[in-house]
Every structure is written in C-alpha cells, then in structure tokens.
C-alpha cells in the first residue's frame, strides 16, 4: 500500500523539519549501553505481545460476527493499532545478536525445539488428516497456526546475521547495509517484490522486516550515539502529534474495513520511539513488572496463545458477557493462561538447576 508508506515519509519529514527549526533533540532509544538492564525494551515487547493477541482477537470476533461492523470495526481498529508488534520483535532480536560459541545451540534449544513441539501438538489437534510431509511443510513455513510464520521468519534473520560478513556490520559499511535494508523493506511494502518471490514465501519473507533488523544492528553497534540528548517536552509533544495523526489515519482505515500490514516502516519506528520516551524504568512499579513479565515471556505466550484462541472458537465471544466484556475476557485468557504456563515451566527449570 504505497499511500500508507508515502504518508509515513511525509510525517517523518514533518518531524525532522520541526526538529531542525525548533532545535529539539532527537532522543535515540538506548537499550544495551546501560549499567543495569533497561526494562523499557521488555515493556515494549510486552505491549507488542499484547498487540499480537489483539490482532488475532479481531479475527476471532470477525469469525462469529462478520456482519456487525459496529463491533468488528472497533476490533479492527485495535488490530491495526497493534501493527507495530512484529517489527518490535525483529528489531529486538537483532539488537542482542552476537556470534559466539553456542550460537546455534541456543537458537535450537531456545526457539526451534519449543516451536517444533508446539507445532506437532497443534498439528495433531487442528488437522484431521495427518501426513509427515504435510506437517514438515507447515512446520518450515509456519502454517500450523497463523502466528507461527514468525518463527521461520526469525530463523532466517539468525542465518543472515551468521553469514553476513563482519565488515558489513560496523562503521560506514553498516550504514550502507541499513540503508539498503530499509530500501528493500520499502520495495517489499509496496509490492514490488511480489512478482519475483514465490507466493508461498510471502508470509515468511525477510524483506518484509529487513529494515527493522538493520535498525537493530545500527543501534547495537553505536552507529547512533548511545548517549541521550537532553530531554525536551516539546520533542515528546511533537512526536505525539505525529503518532496521533497516524492513529487517526489508522482509525479511518479501520472504519472503512481496511486491514493494515504488519510491516509498514514508519508506524512501528515512531511507536518504539514514543514508548521509550514515556515508559518508566522503575522496576518497583507493579505495571512495569507486569508488562516486563509479558515481554520476557513472549515466546511462551506466542506459542501457547494460538491453542487458547483456537479452542475459544468453539464459543461465541459474546457468550462471555457481550462484545466489550467478551473482548476483555478473551484478551485476559490469551495472556494469563500462557503466562501461567511460563511461570510453571520457569519454576521447574529453577528446581532442576538447583539440584
């Protein structure tokens, strides 16, 4: 959708113009150069995980009530509002990638193994006709559950980072790498690459998120100054205006039945910047701990939540007390049940490690 990308370019230019005119500092998110762990990335991941669940809740509501736009337009709006979510996880992954001993071991034990296990169980539950070849194809392309496309996508970025020559990940060459990645991401967003890539590869195409991966590498290498520039209320105010305009446009699209993509460039970047500016890093605040918990355990929630939402398709969401209460209960169940699994598994891991 070129119109949305063009709109993002215009808003980016507007923000850059006011920074230049009013001499307001641009605060670059700094997640990895702190003496203590910055919980804001965990919180942003937490919001992103909530957003992913909200995207799927819209599909759940639409499944039962496709002819009730008074409800589904609102669920679509919340879904479109959450479209920064997947880019956040791609960005966060590249931010912490390092080539070191055990690189592939951690990727297989921490991602591939639980994903394969969850996919195998999901395949047996969801499909009636079982076939090893069919399961293998669905596993490799992330088709057992709709959200699972993210794992093959992320694994491709692990491969890319591993084979990317080291000189392309530092200095001026890194800047060229990032600019190229943003350009390829833009081409993918406006469907230029559709005629080149096979149709089955579309959902797991790394070109859809290449720019966010490159930006993570850029921040990690210090190509952008890691030190905060002086805080400025007008800077937060101005980017809030830009983000508010984006939200209004998203609302306009939503109430016209237009579903946004996950990988438009401007909206996710603006969302990360403003969330980083507004979120607290105080670990003693309950809200901070709660959202950080969701962010830290996003893999558990990501893998288990599809089972919950798939099971819930046996009940109309209105049966939980109407559209509003039904939405809130659906959101709560799809976060709390996987979160409970995460607590149980982590407690078991700690017990075994202490023996």
Image (cartoon, helix red, strand yellow):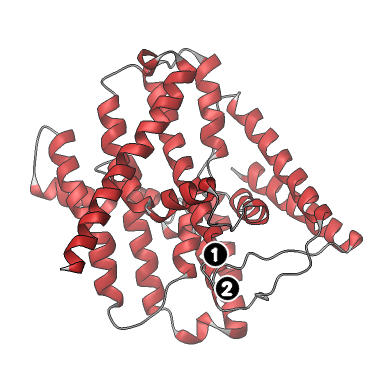
Tell me which residue sits at (29%, 49%) in the image.
342
**Which residue, given by chain and number where applicable, does mark 2 sit on?**
34
Work out which quarter of the rendered image holds the N terminus and state it.
top right
- Counting from the top left corner in percent of width and height, residue 99 is at 38, 81
Tell me which residue sits at (36%, 69%) in the image.
158
Q: Residue furthest right?
A: 21
Q: CA distance from mark 2 to mark 1?
A: 7 Å
Q: Is residue 164 visible?
A: yes
Residue 283 is left or right of residue 65, and the answer is right
Tell me which residue sits at (51%, 82%) in the image.
168
Nearest the camera: 323 or 211?
Answer: 323
Q: Is residue 142 visible?
A: no
**Which residue, given by chain and number where applicable, does mark 1 sit on?**
38
185 up-or-down from 222: above or below: above
Work out which quarter of the rendered image holds the C terminus and state it.
bottom left
- Counting from the top left corner in percent of width and height, residue 230 is at 79, 67
Query: CB under 8 Å between callouts 2 and 1?
Result: yes
169 up-or-down from 144: above or below: below
When asked about the image quadrant of residue 104, the answer is: bottom left
Tell me which residue sits at (38%, 48%) in the image.
203
- Counting from the top left corner in percent of width and height, residue 347 is at 25, 55
Q: Secondary structure at mark 1?
A: loop
- Counting from the top left corner in percent of width and height, residue 50 is at 46, 41
Nearest the camera: 85 or 336?
Answer: 336
Residue 128 is left or right of residue 317, and the answer is left
Q: Secondary structure at mark 2?
A: loop
Dot 2 surroundings within 10 Å: few (below 14), some, or many (20 or more)? Answer: few
């Amino acid at each position: 959708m070129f119109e949305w990308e063009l709109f993002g370019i215009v808003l980016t230019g507007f923000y850059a113009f006011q920074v230049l005119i009013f001499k307001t500092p641009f605060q670059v998110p700094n997640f990895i150069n702190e003496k203590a762990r910055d919980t804001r990335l965990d919180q942003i991941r937490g919001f992103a995980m909530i957003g992913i669940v909200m995207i799927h809740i819209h599909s759940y509501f639409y499944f039962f009530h496709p002819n009730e736009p008074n409800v589904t337009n609102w669920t679509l709006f919340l879904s479109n509002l959450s479209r920064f979510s997947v880019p956040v996880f791609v960005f966060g992954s590249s931010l912490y990638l390092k080539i070191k001993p055990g690189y592939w071991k951690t990727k297989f034990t921490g991602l591939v193994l639980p994903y394969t296990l969850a996919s195998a169980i999901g395949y047996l539950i969801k499909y009636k006709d079982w076939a090893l070849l069919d399961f293998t194809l669905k596993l490799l392309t992330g088709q057992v559950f709709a959200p699972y496309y993210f794992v093959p996508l992320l694994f491709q970025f692990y491969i890319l980072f591993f084979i990317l020559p080291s000189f392309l990940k530092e200095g001026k060459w890194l800047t060229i790498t990032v600019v190229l990645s943003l350009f390829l991401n833009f081409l993918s967003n406006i469907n230029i690459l559709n005629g080149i890539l096979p149709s089955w590869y579309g959902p797991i195409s790394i070109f859809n998120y290449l720019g966010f991966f490159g930006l993570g590498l850029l921040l990690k290498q210090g190509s952008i100054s890691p030190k905060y520039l002086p805080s400025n209320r007008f800077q937060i105010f101005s980017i809030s205006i830009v983000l508010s305009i984006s939200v209004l446009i998203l609302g306009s699209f939503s109430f016209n039945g237009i579903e946004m993509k996950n990988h438009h460039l401007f909206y996710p970047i603006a969302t990360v910047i403003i969330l980083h500016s507004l979120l607290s890093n105080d670990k003693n605040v309950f809200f901070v701990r709660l959202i950080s918990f969701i962010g830290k355990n996003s893999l558990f929630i990501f893998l288990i939540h599809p089972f919950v939402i798939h099971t819930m398709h046996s009940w109309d969401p209105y049966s939980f007390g109407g559209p509003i209460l039904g939405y809130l209960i659906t959101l709560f169940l799809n976060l709390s049940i996987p979160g409970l699994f995460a607590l149980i598994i982590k407690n078991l891991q700690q017990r075994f490690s202490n023996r």
